[in-house]
Amino acid sequence: MMGSNFEFLNPGFLWLLVLIPLLAIWYFLTRNTNSAALTMASTKGFQAKPSILAKLKPLLYVFRLLALTLLILALARPRNVSVSSRTKTNKGIDIVMAIDVSASMLARDLKPNRLEALKKVANEFVNQRPNDRIGIVVYAGESFTQTPITSDKRIVRNTISEIKWGDLDGGTAIGMGLGSAVNRLKESKAKSKVIILLTDGVNNTGFVDPKTATELAVGLDIKVYTIGLGTNGTASFPYAKDPQTGKLLFRSSPVEIDEDLLKYIAKETEGKYFRATDNSKLKAIYEEINKLEKTEIEEFKYYNYQERYRFLVILAGLFILLEVVLRNTIFKSFI
């Protein structure tokens, strides 16, 4: 990245410019006292016409003021500064988002439902991680890697946008979701490895025990942030399809989230547990995780200075020389 700026190295000298209009006023008020006077009884008989050189004589003082102005500007050291920078990522982070896609994720306590609310926030999170690699794992009664860890954010965003309910067996296999995410990171060479595990239910199926998956994460030095998604109390859940229209039917049911398990996973892996009860809280959680997991970036800046005062000094010298020459030649008789 490159940029160019103009600056004065010693801007304090610019205050001296206040003297210029004061000197101009002083010259205007005292100009008549600087000329020789001849007292005569009468000017009758004299028909001398004003000389053009006499009228141009004030130019000598103008040259002097211009020279002084240019010297003051030169003292302020004007210069152009060209800045080029190069960034280097010193500590990359590999992140896997393990997302629950069971039927309960269609509950309407978040708007328009839990799954769609999550997809929007997850995409925003990806946009804020330009220097990291991200992968996506989805799970319900089984788990599936939607996208291996990649630095191509376009692929990750498209994957998140295309997540939907119904492609996996029913149920909530938290252990399998966590296990698949750990498996995605086991070959990672990144200095920091993170899993964001989101669920809205209780582990009720799958052949991988969540605590076993947690032990694997600890052994591979993987930090797990867990998120329990759902309001407190009851929510509108889908329970069946209308046989005539094929649309989902909803009814109010208690919200059940295994918070003890999610807290255990987060604690053992030195992560953190969050509870998202609405859209704004879910967004705030991902923003907090984004702040907690910062990628270290080293920035190198190179400065190139081009001094501009030399031309001003030369020009001021020319004005002074011009005044001296004119004062001692064509204006000599009028001084």
Image: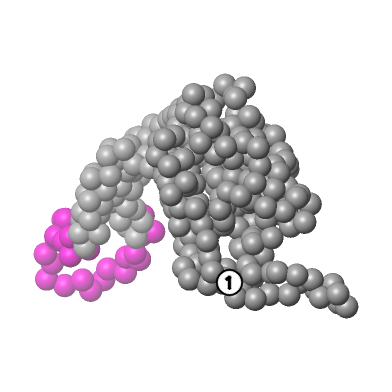
Q: As drawn, is 313 to the left or to the right of 141?
A: left
Q: Is any part of residue 80 visible from this angle?
A: no
Instruction: Name the one closer to the observer, 147 or 271.
Output: 271
Q: As drawn, is 47 to the left or to the right of 184?
A: left
Residue at image coords 88%, 78%: 244
Question: Height in image: 23 above or below 240?
Answer: above
| Residue 152 placement: quadrant | top right
- The colouring scheme, among rainbow, by chain, secondary structure or one colour, is one colour
Q: As drawn, is 266 to the left or to the right of 59?
A: right
- Does the stretch in magenta take in 22? no
> Regarding mark 1 in the picture, which secondary structure is present there?
strand
Q: As drawn, is 181 to the left or to the right of 226?
A: right
User: Which image quarter holds the N terminus?
Assistant: top right
| Residue 103 placement: quadrant | bottom right
Binning the other alpha carbons within 10 Å of mark 1 as few (below 14), some (14 to 19) or many (20 upward) gives some
Measured from the top left, where is residue 189 in percent x and y? 57, 21
- Does the stretch in magenta take in 30? yes
Q: Is any part of residue 213 visible from this angle?
A: yes
Measured from the top left, where is residue 263 in percent x and y? 42, 46
SS assignment for the magenta stretch, majority: loop
Q: Residue furthest right?
A: 244
Measured from the top left, where is residue 259 in percent x and y? 45, 52
Instruction: Name the one closer to the observer, 304 or 160.
Output: 160
Q: Amino acid at mark 1?
A: Ser
Residue at image coords 46%, 68%: 232
Q: Which residues are magenta?
A: 26-53
Measured from the top left, where is residue 157 in percent x and y? 69, 48
Residue at image coords 26%, 71%: 45
Instruction: Name the one closer to the observer, 200 or 162.
Output: 200
Instruction: Name the one closer to the observer, 263 or 26.
Output: 263
Question: Height in image: 36 above or below 317?
Answer: below
> Where is mark 1, residue-wise?
253
